[in-house]
Image: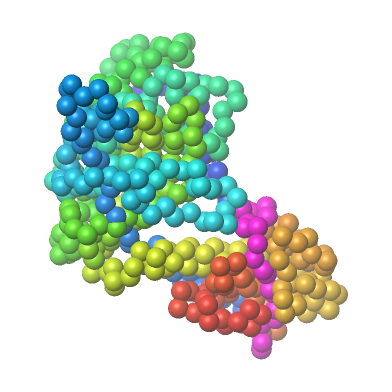
Amino acid sequence: MKKTVVFILSLSMAVSMAACGGSSDSSDVKNEPAASREQKAGDSSQADESQESSSQDISRSDESEQSKADSSSDSKTESAADSKADSQAESKPDAGQMTEVRSGDVHILCDKYSEDIQTDKLEGRVIDDISADIIAEYRCGLNDDFENYFKYYGADKVVTADNMKLFIEDDIDYDSVRTEVLSEYVMLIIAYMDELYADDEEKYEAFFSLDDDNAIISNVEKQAKSIDLDLMKTCLADDYMPYDELVSEIEACREDDIKTPADGNIRSFFEVTGYETDGGTTYVTGSLYVLIDDVGLEFEDIYAWWSEDGHGAFAESTYIEDELEEAALTDEELMQLFYDSEYIDDANTKARYAWRAVANYLSENGLSFEEAVARGDFAEMNSSAGINIKNKGTGSGEKAVLEELESITRATTAGDLYVGALAGEDGDFFVQYRHPEGVMGQYPHPLYSANSREASFGTYY
């Protein structure tokens, strides 16, 4: 009964392609050496555990709750900031103890080596307000207060006719952060409408006006402003799951006697994975890490929007952990731990990709590793200094590796690769990637926080 219209198809395509906008591992390993294949299964699982633990190693935060400004009706000198605060106070509920939001309260985390994301023009107050929305939603979840929780999405303000028109344009940018964020919001309303008219096909078809895109847009915009919260709660639980997952995580923590505090000493760290400003609105994706005393809250896959007139956000996943030893670290130490964990994960990933590229090259050319080295195919990569990935390489093998690495991952603009033979393993080899930050990754046998800086470049660890 759920009709598929051009408009919905466009949205579905936007969601799927935006989600795939980053790197993808499209290279299969061909003819991997036996010893490495056997070790790979264990190392791969070990690497997955490393990535899970590293993202939970630092559950971090700071409080940024939306402030309510007291302004008198006869004041003629009200500031723009005060006007904005009053406007927000009208549309946003009090989700617990409020504290004043100051520009730059939340630490902004971003890979400084990324060519795609630069936060130098991203204002602190944008991240402050977005983080405040997410923390407020968490507090609403503590009381199973869906009505106030959903207000922090700001769906009625962002799902507008002007914003939705981009989905029926021929030149839509599927890699756009704006498209990614708006897709999530609009698809939420579409799913809600499916439920709303689930038992009345005639009303459903009339509502969508199948032959008129502008009518569809107008109807969706109107529906976003008149949500039945009980029905929306069902949609979020069944289709989108953010609220259901938040409440389930809180209940599970309470059953396990894990603290779920609403307030305390709060420190916040926002990892920006993408942002874009268009028409006065900034769209942001990322994750928020919050420390409330020694309890870590991790909000992943955040979709958010911000403008002078309002803002909203939601996180698709929430994780809670208490009694964290990292809580004793300073903000600077926490940030360094975060970056180390991220850079080590990145270094291990690049080492793995490069290892696969070497294996592919050997297989395609019918060579053993020793034969390829003897021919000079890895002249620089096999030297003590390795090869910087900015270079093209002199040997045919390393040229192939650098080309494949560039094609399957958004490689950083710096860093060194080394390939060497595994001692005592006939025909087997290992690859190391040295990150500009000084941490190192390796494959096989990925490195971790405890040993990444101890390992010596060019020597298997």
Residue 217: image x %, image y %?
41, 17
Front residue of 215 and 103: 103
Query: 360 or 107: which is nearer to us?
Result: 107
* 382, above or below 69, in the image: below
Identity of the residue drawn at 37% across and 25% down: 159
Q: Could you say which quadrant of the image residue 243 lies in?
A: top left
Question: Residue 411 in magenta?
Answer: yes
- Corner quadrant of residue 417: bottom right
The answer to whether 420 appears left or right of 249 in the picture is: right
Regarding residue 128, the answer to whether it shows in the image is yes
Residue found at x 54% / y 48%: 117
Q: Given the current orientation, which residue lies at the most extreme right position? A: 375
Q: Is residue 123 above or below residue 41?
A: above
Q: Quadrant of the C terminus?
A: bottom right
Question: Which residue is depicted at the point 44% across and 20% down?
Answer: 162
Residue in the picture at 31% in, 46% down = 102
Q: Is residue 422 above or below residue 91?
A: below
What segment is highlighted magenta in the picture? 406-424
Residue 416 is covered by the magenta coloring? yes
Which percent across, then down, holds residue 224?
A: 31, 23
Q: Quadrant of the N terminus?
A: top left
Q: Where is residue 123 drawn, in percent x and y?
A: 43, 43
Which is nearer the eye, 335 or 189? 335
The residue lying furthest to the bottom in this view is: 424
Q: Position of residue 2 (x, y in %)?
A: 37, 24
